């Protein structure tokens, strides 16, 4: 604030920090995350941290492909970050970010290779950035993805106090003749569901309205139906299905279609891979719905159709195969996940019918 001294207006020293952007904090954050980021690098990564762009050597990979196709996707964590802020717990939202993006390209049969992140907030706290990126890096190592770059943005005039926004860009590769696009799906194929462990990264605006605004609950509250507090239940990390899908591919089981069940639930996501003149009939009694969804349905008095359009309802990914391949898929995934036969393909108009 300006001061009036001896008839003169004395202006305080103006710099970037006084405008709300702390360059030193940004530099500190980079130093804190360097080791985590480097731990994800494969031998294909040619640049270090701080370069204007990232270089990735494709030649070692191309020997395994006749006609390689690059696959990319971008995704975010949405308002799940608000739960992290309320809990003061940021170690899982970086995991969520990689899973959300990776799952969107593995549905095409693509192997994820590199990842870029964008973390924005009102005020940069290097320690929080370190925790977020450490979780992200851990997920990258577990799924053989190189975290090759990122951006932190401090924007106090854009974001509410204490809030964060996370966005990630994934790049992968698939053999052109092995792209999974749903085009060979046909009536009598079966729909296999892989369980989620909660909301994953979708539906949090509705979930917060139901649980906190309508239900009056707090993140630390415990309910008899839940193993953890409300907040911890909502922060369960988004499952990454990369190893699941590539385990099936390795066994040469023909996958006809895969859908990542994100925003829009089963009702909106499955039609994205269906050929014309096909429907999918879903039997909602064929898998156990996690308690958090039933709690929200009851508190908010939400209609069933709206629940299935807003949440994954306990199914994080669906795989469509020939009915004769179900047991093969189940046996292959036994070490990784439970497997549910949740529906079948029939003639129709690219719709999902819930029963």
Image: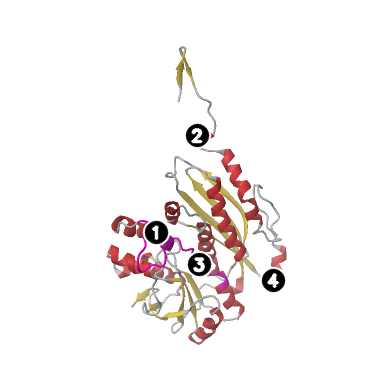
Query: Between disc 4 and disc 2, whose residue precedes?
Result: 2
Marks 3 and 4 in Cβ contact (< 8 Å): no
Query: Between disc 3 and disc 1, whose residue precedes?
Result: 1
Query: Between disc 3 and disc 2, whose residue precedes?
Result: 2
Q: Residue furthest bottom?
A: 324
Give the Cα separation between the discs numbered 2 and 1: 32 Å
Q: Which mark is residue 204?
A: 1
Q: Which mark is residue 160?
A: none
Q: Residues within 10 Å of mark 3 (few under 14, many from 20)?
A: many
Q: Which residue is mark 3?
A: 239
Residue at the image point whose x is 29% and y is 57% from the top: 214
155 shown above or below 94: above
Q: Nearer the viewer, mark 4 or mark 2?
A: 2
Left or right, 152 with reference to 263: right
Residue 54 in the image: x percent, y percent? Answer: 65, 53
Q: Which residue is mark 2?
A: 19
Give the Cα separation between the discs numbered 3 and 2: 39 Å
Magenta part of the chain = 218-243
Q: Residues within 10 Å of mark 1 (few under 14, many from 20)?
A: many
Q: Which residue is mark 4?
A: 64
Helix, strand or loop status at disc 2: helix
């Amino acid at each position: 604030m300006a001061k009036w001294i001896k008839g003169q207006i004395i202006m305080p020293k103006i710099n970037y920090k006084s405008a709300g952007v702390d360059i030193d904090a940004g530099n500190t954050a980079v130093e804190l995350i360097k080791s985590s980021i480097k731990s994800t690098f494969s031998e294909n990564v040619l640049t270090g941290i701080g370069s204007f762009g990232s270089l990735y050597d494709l030649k070692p990979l191309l020997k395994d492909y006749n006609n390689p196709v690059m696959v990319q996707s971008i995704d975010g964590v949405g308002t799940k970050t608000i739960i992290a802020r309320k809990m003061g717990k940021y170690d899982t939202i970086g995991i969520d970010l990689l899973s959300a993006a990776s799952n969107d390209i593995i549905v095409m049969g693509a192997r994820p290779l590199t990842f870029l992140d964008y973390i924005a907030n009102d005020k940069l706290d290097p320690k929080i950035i370190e925790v977020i990126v450490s979780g992200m890096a851990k997920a990258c190592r577990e799924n053989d993805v190189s975290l090759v770059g990122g951006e932190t943005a401090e924007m106090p005039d854009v974001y509410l106090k204490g809030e964060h926004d996370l966005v990630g860009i994934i790049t992968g590769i698939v053999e052109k003749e092995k792209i999974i696009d749903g085009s060979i799906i046909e009536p009598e194929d079966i729909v296999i569901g892989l369980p989620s462990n909660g909301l994953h990264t979708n539906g949090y605006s509705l979930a917060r309205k139901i649980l906190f605004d309508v239900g009056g609950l707090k993140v630390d509250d415990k309910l008899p139906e839940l193993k953890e507090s409300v907040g911890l239940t909502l922060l369960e990390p988004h499952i990454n299905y990369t190893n699941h899908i590539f385990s099936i591919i390795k066994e040469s089981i023909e996958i006809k279609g895969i859908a990542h069940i994100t925003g829009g639930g089963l009702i909106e996501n499955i039609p994205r891979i269906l050929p014309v003149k096909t429907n999918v009939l879903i039997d909602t009694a064929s898998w156990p719905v996690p308690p958090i969804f039933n709690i929200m349905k009851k508190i908010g008095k939400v209609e069933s159709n709206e629940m299935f359009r807003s949440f994954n309802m306990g199914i994080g990914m669906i795989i469509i195969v020939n009915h004769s391949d179900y047991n093969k898929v189940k046996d292959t995934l036994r070490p990784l996940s439970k497997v549910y036969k949740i529906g079948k393909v029939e003639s129709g108009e690219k719709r999902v019918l819930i029963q």
